[in-house]
């Protein structure tokens, strides 16, 4: 199930890079780290990706911990379009970003 989500994640990143989405790679970086560019000395730690099992009765938005550089994604995302829509909604409606 995690492999399915990673597959969708990779397609989403490629689509962002190609300008096929409402969000950019810089938006994704800001969602995860709070910075929309990589600092000149880089980040102190690597970004960790964690997975969670979504509640079937709720929307399983991806979340991030900017302090810990952690991205939390739902397991079992199989449709790249659904993944993109979910992730873009999380980014664009994230508190304090815009």
Image: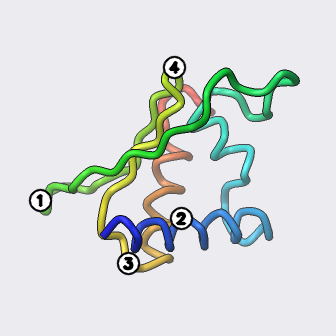
Residue 43 placement: quadrant: top right
* C-alpha gap between disc 2 and disc 4: 22 Å
Determine the secondary structure under disc 4. loop
Q: Earlier in the sequence, mark 1 or mark 3?
A: 1
For the residues marked 2 and 1, what is the alpha-carbon distance in whole angstroms?
A: 23 Å
Please identify the quarter of the rendering in which residue 17 is found.
Answer: bottom right
Label drawn at residue 78: 3
Closer to the eye: label 1 or 4:
4
Up the image or down, 23 lies above or below 85; here it is above
Horizontal side, residue 54 vs residue 18: left or right: left
Circle 2 residue: 9
Query: Where residue 7 sits in the image (x, y, percent)?
Result: 50, 73
The reply to whether discs 2 and 1 touch (Cβ–Cβ < 8 Å) is no
Q: Earlier in the sequence, mark 3 or mark 2?
A: 2
Looking at the rendered image, the quarter that the C terminus falls into is top right
For marks 2 and 1, the one nearer the N-term is: 2
Tell me the SS state at disc 2.
Answer: helix
The 10 Å Cα crowd at callout 2, few under 14, some 14 to 19, many 20 or more, is some
Secondary structure category for the residue under label 3: loop
Residue at 63% x, 46% y is 28
Q: Nearer the viewer, mark 2 or mark 1?
A: 2
Of badges 1 and 3, the one in the foreground is 3
Instruction: Compare marks 2 and 4 and give the one earlier in the sequence.
Output: 2
Which circle marks residue 57 in the picture? 1
Q: Is residue 63 above or below residue 11?
A: above
At mark 1, the secondary structure is loop
Q: Residue at x 45, y 67 (%)?
A: 83
At a point 41% along the width and 41% down the height, the residue shown is 63
Q: Is residue 25 above or below residue 95?
A: below
**Which residue is at 42% across, 73% downward?**
82
**Residue 81 left/right relative to 57:** right
| Colour basis | rainbow
């Amino acid at each position: 199930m995690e492999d399915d989500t990673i597959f969708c994640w990779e397609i989403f990143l490629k689509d962002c890079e190609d300008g096929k989405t409402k969000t950019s790679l810089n938006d994704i970086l800001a969602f995860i780290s709070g910075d929309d560019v990589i600092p000149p000395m880089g980040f102190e730690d690597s970004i960790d990706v964690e997975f969670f099992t979504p509640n079937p009765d709720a929307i399983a938005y991806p979340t991030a911990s900017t302090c810990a550089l952690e991205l939390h994604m739902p397991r079992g995302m199989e449709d790249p379009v659904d993944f993109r829509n979910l992730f873009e909604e999380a980014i664009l409606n994230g508190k304090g970003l815009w």
